[in-house]
Every structure is written in C-alpha cells, then in structure tokens.
Image: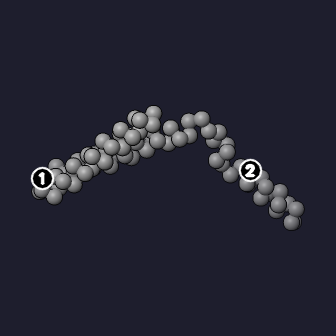
Amino acid sequence: MKIVLITILILVLGTISYGFYLKNTGDPNGEITIGIGVLAIAFVLMPLFIYHRYRNKNIKDFTFDKYRKDLEEHNKKNS
C-alpha cells in the first residue's frame, strides 16, 4: 500500500506540474490539468492515505469520550 501511495503522489505531483507548464505556455488546458491533479489528491490520494494510516487502529482511542467522562467527574467533585 505504501508503494501505491507513493506512486499516486508522484503521478499527481507530475500532473499538477505539467498543468502549470501548460498554463505558462498559454495552453488553456493547463488549468484543467491542474484541477484534475487537485481532485485526484482530494478524492483518491487522501482517502487512501487515511485508510492506510488508521487501518488497524481503534477509533475509540481518538475520541474525547474518556476526556468528557473525566471532565464530568471533575465537575461533580467541585459542585
């Protein structure tokens, strides 16, 4: 999965760079190419990256449930 992410990142950065090159040469398709690269980052690369990073993690470790319970207990003690 790591190799796939790196490959997609290189392809997307290449697409965006090529889009800027086209835009600087005056080709009207440069902005479309840049837009496709940005959409690929937002809708392909980022979800794959998030899935890869949090695949085997427990989601409850990243919520504020424990903090909220501790805060409620602390407020009850101070009341």
Question: Which x, y percent locates residue 19?
Answer: 22, 51
Q: Nearer the viewer, residue 9 or 42?
A: 9
CA distance for labels 2 and 1: 55 Å
Query: On residue 66, which mark appears?
Result: 2
Q: Quadrant of the N terminus?
A: top left
Q: Which mark is residue 46?
A: none
Residue 61 in the figure: left or right of residue 20: right
Q: What residue do we see at 45% from left, 37% from top?
A: 2
Q: Report the side of 26 relative to 79 (left or right).
A: left
Query: Which corner quadrant of the image does residue 11 belong to?
Result: top left
Amino acid found under the numbered disc labelled 2:
Lys
* Residue 65 horizontal/vertical position (percent): 71, 49
In the image, taking residue 36 as reference, residue 67 lies left or right, namely right
- 30, 2: nearer the viewer: 2
Residue 31, can we see it? no
Residue 27: mark: 1
Mark 1: few, some, or many residues within 10 Å (few <14, many ≥20)?
few
Pointer 2 or 1: first along the chain? 1
Q: Residue furthest bottom?
A: 78
